Structures are given as structure tokens and as C-alpha cells.
Image (tube, coloured by chain):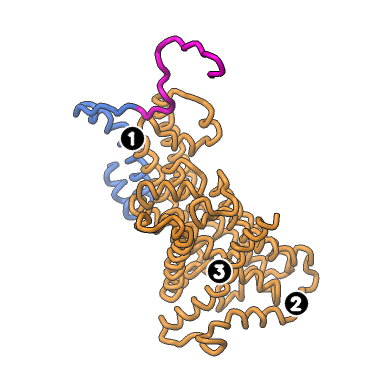
Amino acid sequence: MLLSLIEIFAVILPVLLGIAYLTLAERKIMGSMQRRVGPNHIGLFGLLQPLSDGIKLLLKETIFPSQSDKIFFISAPLIIFTVNLLGWATIPFGEGNSISDMELGIIYLLAMSSISVVGIILAGWSGNSKYSLMGSLRTTAQLISYELVIGLTILTIIGVVGSYNLNEIILFQKHSIIFLLPLLPLFPILFISALAETNRVPFDLVESESELVSGAFTEYSSFSFALIFLVDKLEYGAMISMCTLINILFLGGYLVPFSYLFSDFLLIFLEPLFLGLKTCLLLFIFIWVRATLPRVKFNQLINLNWKCLLPITLGLFMLVISLLILIFPIDNINIQYLFLPFIFKNFKINKKFFNKFLILILILGFLSFFIYFIYISNILTKNII
Amino acid sequence: MIFNAIRKATFEQPFAVWGLALGFAGPALVLIVPPIRDYMGFVAPMSIPESYPLPNRPRRPTIGYED
């Protein structure tokens, strides 16, 4: 019991600290990109700035809007905070080094990221303000749209690996090659979707600091705002977890290059370090994008998802799965696992027949999805927006 | 006629057309490549054994505390 508590704190505390200092890193990096100094007054090189920001937020008065639903108003940030941190349970920091090495880890991660949408809707609705309600609706539309693309990208990788376990996805890359190279077209798609999913520039419409004043969280102040600011879907916590996920899926997670040069004992320390370094690289690109690109319009955002990214991701999914069937015609257990993970573990089937059946199902599914998505995108772009 | 329609679609909805092209390239490859591969003399490798081969003889009687 005590040991597991220590384990959990050993993960959560660095994550929270990382989130706090990511805010400082962002301000410093953006400062240098815009020929400014950035925060440099509090502590050495401004290192105590996140602490000062936190204390400032905590010392402010908590205001409840009149006629707001106080229970939901308080619980919404807690739901977002808890759910976002729960996602870290399955992230492997080294070989077999995670809080919970779940068999369906990636599904768990996706589920956790989806549940936090509930918190955002609650936050927007319970404040009794039409602005925050509209903000939460915009957020939900954006998050749900882009989760489709992220889910499809992840499904493609699951099809290749044949496992939902994050550790096995990394080990597969260790024994073959990191997925960035063979699945290169999927990487920018996932990266752009991650930018939208975390509501970062150029897709930060729901927050739009200059106009909307925090979108769904307009009515929040003090500690509850600090909770949202720390790990909410809109900013830094989601950024770190999303970058870690991209890292695990495409850059090999904790894998150390030339790991045979190091002893096993040294690798225990190097693996988490490399996980962090690769994640930092991705985070730097997130910040770089923020300092470079202007904000897109809402119809452009929805168009990009439904009319550009989704058709291409669907096509790539079909191509990758078909190539797997083509290259491994007999032993494509992985793909069967993708569709019905539990049944095919126990049943033996005529695999040659199954391949033809699978291709037929794939073509039909692909066509129907494609037509459906084009239909939806037309409705969305013509009627609603 | 069809060619012109596709050509027009590539300008109007390029991502949809390329998505469809990518999506159909996969199944087309699965249908087209194996006959060509067979024609070129490719023999499919044996599937990976999933268990140890059992000896093709009657089982030896056990002695004492064996088994």
C-alpha cells in the first residue's frame, strides 16, 4: 500500500512540476523567438516564476456566479484534473516500469482523454453564463472531431503491433524500427491533431486569450482556475501527456539509441531520461508552432479535420492494413487482433478464408465511412457553421 | 467522361480523392500482387511453428516416479 502510494507520487509530482515549469519554458522560448527577455525577475533566471504565479492564483478570492450549480461548478475542475492525471498510470517510463502495465493501456488512455470532455461541458454549463456555455460547446465540437483522427492513427499502429499495451508497442519498435520512418505520413497528421486536441495555437479558438477570456472557463477564479490551468484539456497537462503519447507511438518512447553500449543498471536511469528528452523535443515544437502561426477560423478548423485529415487517415489506415495482409498472408494475427482482440486469442479459424473476408469487410467499411464522413462534413460546413 | 470527373474532383476535393486513391490502392495490391508473385515463382514461406513438434511414435511407458 505504502509502496504503491510512493510509486504514484513518484509519477505525479514530477508531472505536476513539469507542467509548472513548462509554462516558464514556453514564456522563455517565446520570448527569445520574439526578441524579448521573458520572465527573469523572480528567482535566478526567473526560475521561481511558476511558484509565484501559483501562489498568486491561490491567494485570490473564489467567486461563485449567482445561480450557478455549485456542486458541478466545483466538481468540474476536479474531474478534469483527476482524469488527466489518471492517464499517466499506463505510461511506461522504462522497460516494465509503469504504475500499471495494462493489457488495453492505449484504450484506457483514449478513454481518459474522452472523459475530460464531460468535465469541460460541466464547467461551461454550471457557471450559468451563456459565454462559458458556448465556449464549452465549441471545445466539445473540436475535441470530439479531432479524437476521430487520433483514434484512427492509433488503430493503424495497433494493427501493425498487434497489441494495445504501450510497453509492447515500444518493444516492437525496439526489435524493428521506430514507427516515425515506416509510418511517416501518419506522424504529421497525429501532430496536427494533437495541436487541435490540446487546443494549442493555431487551433486555440476555444480559449482565444485575446477575445474569449478562457472560453468554457470564463467564470472560474482562484484555486479552481489553477486546477484547470494546470492540467486541463486546454493547456499544459494535456500537452505533456499528448507529447508523451506521440513519443511512445512514433519515436520509441523510452528507447535509448545504441542501448547495447550501456549496462542494464545504467539503462534504468537512462530510459526515463530519454523519454523525457524526446517529449521535450516535441513540446518545443508545440511552443515553436505557437510562436509562429496565426489562429485559424472555426470553419477552417472543422474543414481541416473532416475534409483533409480524416479522408487521408482513413486511406492510410486501409493501405497499411492491406500491406500487412499482403506481406504476412498467413500469420497476420495482429490484424485479427485489431478487430476482435478477445475472440481471436482463443479461436482457431481458416486464415486464408479470413483474409479474403477481411479485405471485403475493409473495403465496405472504408467506403461507408468515407461516404458518411464526407456527408457529415458537408452538413457541418454548409449548414451549421 | 469519368476521367474528366475525377480530374475535376482532384481540384475541388483533393483530399477526398487522394484518400480514396490511397484506400483503394491497398486492397488492389492485395488482389493484384499475389498472382504476379506466384507467376514469378515465389514460394510462400512456412508459417512460424506455434508449438514443439510431437514425436510420431507411441508414448514410452513411464518408470518409477517419472512423469
- Quick check: is B53 in the magenta stretch? yes
**What span is in magenta?**
B47-67
Report crowding for label 1: few under 14, some 14 to 19, many 20 or more residues within 10 A (C-alpha). some
Question: Pointer 3: residues within 10 angstroms few (<14), some, or many (20+)?
Answer: many
Q: Which mark is residue A236?
A: 3
Helix, strand or loop for the magenta stretch, by majority: loop
Residue, far front: B64
Q: How far apart are labels 1 and 2 at the CA level?
A: 61 Å
Q: Which mark is residue A326?
A: 1
Residue A225 is left or right of residue A72, and the answer is left
Amino acid of disc 2: Thr
Residue type marked 1: Leu
Chain letter behind tag 3: A
Q: Position of residue A13 (x, y in %)?
A: 61, 67
Report the amino acid beneath label 3.
Tyr
Q: Give the left or right position of residue A175, taking residue A230 as reference.
A: left
